[in-house]
Image (cartoon, rainbow, N blue to C red):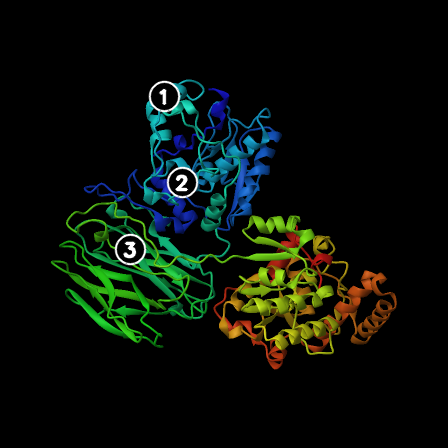
Amino acid sequence: MAPAFSRVCFYNYQNGAEDQSERVQYSLKENPENGSITVPLRIEDSDSPLDLDLISSKLWRPGRELKIGFLSGTEWQRDQVKKYATHWTLYANIRFTFVTDMASFPPDVLVDFDASKGTWSYLGTDCGYWSSQGRPSVNLAWIIDRRPQAELRADILHQFGHVLGRVHEDEKPQALFPWNTDQIYRDLGGPPTCWDRSQVDRCYFARFLLKTVQGTQIDPSSIMRNYYPSTWTWNEGRTIFNLDLSEHDKEYIRYYYPSQGNLARNFNTMEIDRPEKVETIQKHHEKKQCFNQTQSESSNIITGINWVSFRPHNRIRLDANIVEHDQKKGTASIRVWSESPMYSAGMNWFEMGSRFPFVQHGVFNCHDLQGKGKSKTITFSTPFSEPPRVVCLIKSLDLDGENNWRFRASPTRITAKGFKVSAEAWHNSTLYEANVVWVAHPADRSNVASGGVAATDTRPWWKPQQNNSFEVTFDKPFLKQTVTSFTREASVNSQANETLQAKGVQIVGYDLNGPREVLVHQLKKIDVLISCITWEHLESQNPWIEAAKEAGVKRFVPSEWVGPAPRGIIDIKDKKLDILGVIQRVGLPYTLIDVGCWFQVWVPKISSGRSDHAHSIYIDHRIVGDGNQKFGLTDMGDIGKYVAQIISDARTLNRRVFAYTEVLSMNEIWDTMATVSGEIPPRDYVSEEDLREIIESCGKRWHEHGAKVDIMDVANYNMGQYRISWCIRGDNTPEFADYLGYLDFWKLFPDFPKVRSLKAFYQQVVTGPCAGYGPATSE
């Protein structure tokens, strides 16, 4: 094969029909969301609904750690993979870990470097299936040192795009090429591939159906655009060998591997069972599920059936529900009855709660239903300002099997006060029972859409067909929320800002000493402005406050991020309250957010030294007083989650909010480290009197030496005041925050998902590298 062919990817060659149904089941176990876009194609007279035409999405579960192992290759070749493959993880919520002990840590992806087998990869979760069989899931034949680094990077990025579930841009239905088939057969029929015509056909002349491809438009700049030589087409055209991820590639991977959990979830019976014959069919299919939000009531979860496959001419009788439910988890359950031989079924559920206060929902129970249909008038608990959008989901269904299965659930006569919901069968179909879930939301709500589709939208009812899919256009486009980070001009190209930029954040440099109108212009399109200015430069917020008011910013969040306290206790807090005064004087809408003490402040030392890397030298780790005064604590990494929830709620406008994860005493903090580490951290105590003397002496030296003061005097002065407030006075508690007029985060959002505990944080500390508290993060 000519060297130019080193740029060609042959992944479709490895994407054949072997073990296809097992791979589908593997993909559903790995990521149940794959079931929502899985398309079963079944021969009409077959008893089995699963055959070799079953096509499934192959995406990994977002947040997954993919373990990558090597079957061969030099250290240099392996280093190239480690260097370039991880570029995808800058944009996707997924991690790559390269393992050497594959017996202890079975890999999800097995990489080989066999020069005789071309360059290819299996698609998405198929990598995991074949790796579990001990077979390579990626082969990189052309990672050789005489090729340019740019081409090596392109090859590796391309193949790991397949690993994450991406197909070739050229294999979308819109991609039509005038192939010179005879030339391709000649080239690929010789060494090293030596393929027959069927292998070439599968690799190059197959096309994915529109319904199985995530994305519709071809991106000519995509790293997933396959290269082919000019002699392979009659018009002697050739693709450009793209060398890096395009913007479309980055957007695609962000979308399919999001950073936040999906509140719409799926369960398919094939995740746990794949019956081949009717005799093996189970009656109950259940799987425990963890919620993305804490659920205070079972009524906050709505369910619906999204997939059914029953034996023909039999009664359809099934129910989809979440059972054995508590605040953090439940069991997804699909139940069928003995007279209903089911091959497979699927359900989805949606977690409601405080994130969707504008939505109303309920269940129309047709328990006494007999015959063709029944309807009921639903009255909203709170009238909408205008007629809302209403959709219906089928929660349970019981249809006679003697005749064709016909059923529909629909809302009609929708007004601001209510609507009519109907559940009906027609012609010779008989409906025994059904439960219909209805969901109503304001019609004019931005970034919210709903609707329904019917097979008769694409073809007449008397012409049944398997493929009934088509594209849906939203009434109004979804608005993309842009995140902008303002930074000093000198820091625009810093490593931290480059990392943010890779995640889609727009980086804008500014000069506070520049013209005021420039700052106003920069803020014109900003709805919410959040300040993270460090304590030394709090006054730098004043120009931003004035410019934000003039620009029409809808909410300003000043730099707080610690704990509540009254004036006269903490100098830094007094300066922050002065900033609040400026905000209120100019009339700028605001939300002040305090989050308690950070986990990262208190990392007790243990004798093994496992916590040393997260232990700050700038913190006096002696226990204050008797160590029994409780105070609020929060992981720094979770502050953003709290803030995102707070600023999206109108109740928090022009208010102060206290968000915290746990309320513990210093003794309890030390106990937690002992429990996690199995070691007893030493407990040294400092009295209130001694601590106040330290504060006074450090303050004097700071006053005398000014900017030349020892940094430890500054640290002991500031942290000493915080420790008096937290550990002696008890200011940093939900009770005292309530006294000061704060809103309690957990009372506002009782269904908010629980975040990382102090125990979980310490578990990370003692087992590996963990960012601790240091000069760069100090208050």
Mark nearer the viewer, 1 or 2: 2
* Residue 768 shows up from this direction: no
Relative horizontal placement of residue 775, taking residue 555 as reference (left or right)? right
**Secondary-structure class at tag 2:** loop
Residue sitting nearer the eye, 591 or 646: 591
Which badge, 1 or 2, is on the more N-terminal residue? 1
Amino acid carrying label 2: it is: Ile
* Residue 291 shows up from this direction: yes
Query: Mark 3 packing: few (<14 Cα in 10 Å), some, or many (20+)?
Result: some
Relative horizontal placement of residue 570, taking residue 410 as reference (left or right)? right
Relative horizontal placement of residue 346, taking residue 193 as reference (left or right)? left
Query: As displayed, is residue 527 above or below residue 505?
Result: below
Which badge, 3 or 1, is on the more N-terminal residue? 1
**Spatial separation of the CA atoms under disc 3 and disc 1:** 51 Å
Q: Which residue is mark 2?
A: 218
Mark nearer the viewer, 3 or 1: 1
Amino acid carrying label 1: it is: Tyr
Q: Position of residue 351 (x, y in %)?
A: 41, 63
Residue in the picture at 29% in, 45% down: 40
Q: Name the disc covering residue 185, or none.
A: 1
Query: As displayed, is residue 565 above or below residue 208?
Result: below
Q: Name the disc covering residue 283, or none.
A: 3
Amino acid carrying label 3: it is: Lys
Residue in the picture at 77% in, 58% down: 617
Q: State if disc 1 and disc 3 touch (CB < 8 Å).
A: no
Relative horizontal placement of residue 35, taking residue 110 as reference (left or right)? left
Query: Mark 1 packing: few (<14 Cα in 10 Å), some, or many (20+)?
Result: some
Query: Mark 2 packing: few (<14 Cα in 10 Å), some, or many (20+)?
Result: some
Mark nearer the viewer, 3 or 2: 2
